[in-house]
Image (spheres, helix red, strand yellow):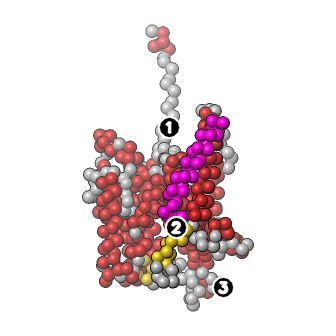
Amino acid sequence: MGAVGGALKKAILAALVTLGLAFPIIAYRTDVDLSNHLVLIARWPLAAALAGAALVATLLLSLLRPSWGEARAVKTGRKAAEHPLSRHLPQLGLALLLAVPFIAAASAALGGPGVLKLIDNYGIQILTYVLLAWGLNIVVGLAGLLDLGFVAFYAVGAYSTALLSKTYGLSFWLCLPLAGILASFWGLLIGFPVLRLKGDYLAIVTLAFAEIVRLVIINWVPVTGGYAGISSIPKPTIFGYTLGSEPGGLMRLAGLPPSPIYRLAFMYYILLALALFAYWVTRRLRALPAGRAWEAMREDEIACRSLGINTVATKLSAFAAGAFFGGLAGSFFAVHQSFVSPKSFEFMESAIIVAIVVLGGLGSSIGVAIAAVVMIGGTELLRELSFLRAVLGDEFDPTQYRMLLFGLAMVLLMIWRPKGLVATREPSITLPPRAAPAAAPAALAAE
């Protein structure tokens, strides 16, 4: 009875805390009446429902936690047998990614969400953040440099592509590497002032750099367009042919019916190729001396210097490599949206990318990808919670609580998995097993 009583006490306390937190935010909503006066609308049933959910969840967790602890205690040091499918997981994952447009088309045919929504809101948007997070993972996860201004390289890549394509008429395939190179150049520029900084000071400087880039974009109106942005950015082509339904387009020449699905699927596969390229390069860099130097500097910079590693070049290379992938993501974003503006490169974007890297596990590429799917895909799924209106009333708007539930999920994850979803990482390089010492010669044995 003692365990049940303790669990019930914790559950009641959690419900009271939830009710107290929900009082100023959820229990009352401000609105404007017909006389343009501010009025308060009571929503106590919604606050009570959240408190009840907290009570039930805390009670169940408190009752089940001892069994989890016992399960951990009886574990032995023996390694579990590898499942036959585990060695084929990378191939299965790649096949699933390649089949996303076809799965979206099949889902739409069965009465699910539209193809454009599935490919754009889920496939392309998630892959964009995966590419950005893998770039930041080099700086934060491998090199251990806290960068809160990664969105600046994202903006540099997007505006570089927009200006080069509209002003000089360069195609996307030329703008893509140029955007990455220009972003790397700016990564080197921000790397020089922060060579002697670490921790919070480094984060403040990188945050200031991102804000400087955003303000330059806003105020350099003759070039960047200011708040109006740059529109009508040309789409990618294949050997000079567009994928639209306009005359002379590739789909029209092939005799296919006009549809925006072809272009959207083409953009998805371009982004998938960029993401796979970023993953392959990151894996290769980790095995090279530069990647091992990043990880050594992350663990102990003083010991890294004592071993003769040039920390200046190591930091600069980390900033440049991470910024390169940020520039690639920005270049793709510009041509996909055909429009760029300062609104797309605010601090919140950097915060989301940093949260993906930290929650996924510093240095873990797979964990970062899983965190991007959960965070970005989860926030999009929260838009589809309109069925809760049947329970909580017609005035319930799920889009207003997306960030609240998102923040709650982040807090719970950091409590249960403080090192991220994938806390373990494969070693960058492994040494071959040492051979057994040879037997002593018979003559020495005789002596």
Q: Does 274 appear above or below 81?
A: below
Q: Which residue is mark 2?
A: 28
- Mark 3 falls on what kind of element? loop
What residue appears at the point 47 percent right and 46 percent down from the top-left corner? 428
Residue at 54% from the left image edge and 52% from the top image edge: 16
Q: Could you tell whether 209 is left or right of 427 in the image?
A: left
Rendered location of residue 346, percent (x, y): 40, 69
Q: CA distance from mark 1 to mark 3?
A: 58 Å
Q: State the image coordinates of residue 120 (x, y, percent, origin top left).
A: 57, 72
- Residue at numbered disc 1: 432
> Which residue type carries mark 2?
Tyr
Extent of the magenta region: 1-28
| Image-quadrant location for residue 139 | bottom left
State the predominant SS element of the stretch in magenta. helix
Instruction: Check residue 17 for magenta coloring.
Output: yes
The answer for how far apart the CA atoms under marks 2 and 3 are is: 52 Å
Label 3 crowd bin: few (<14), some (14–19), many (20+), radius 10 Å = few
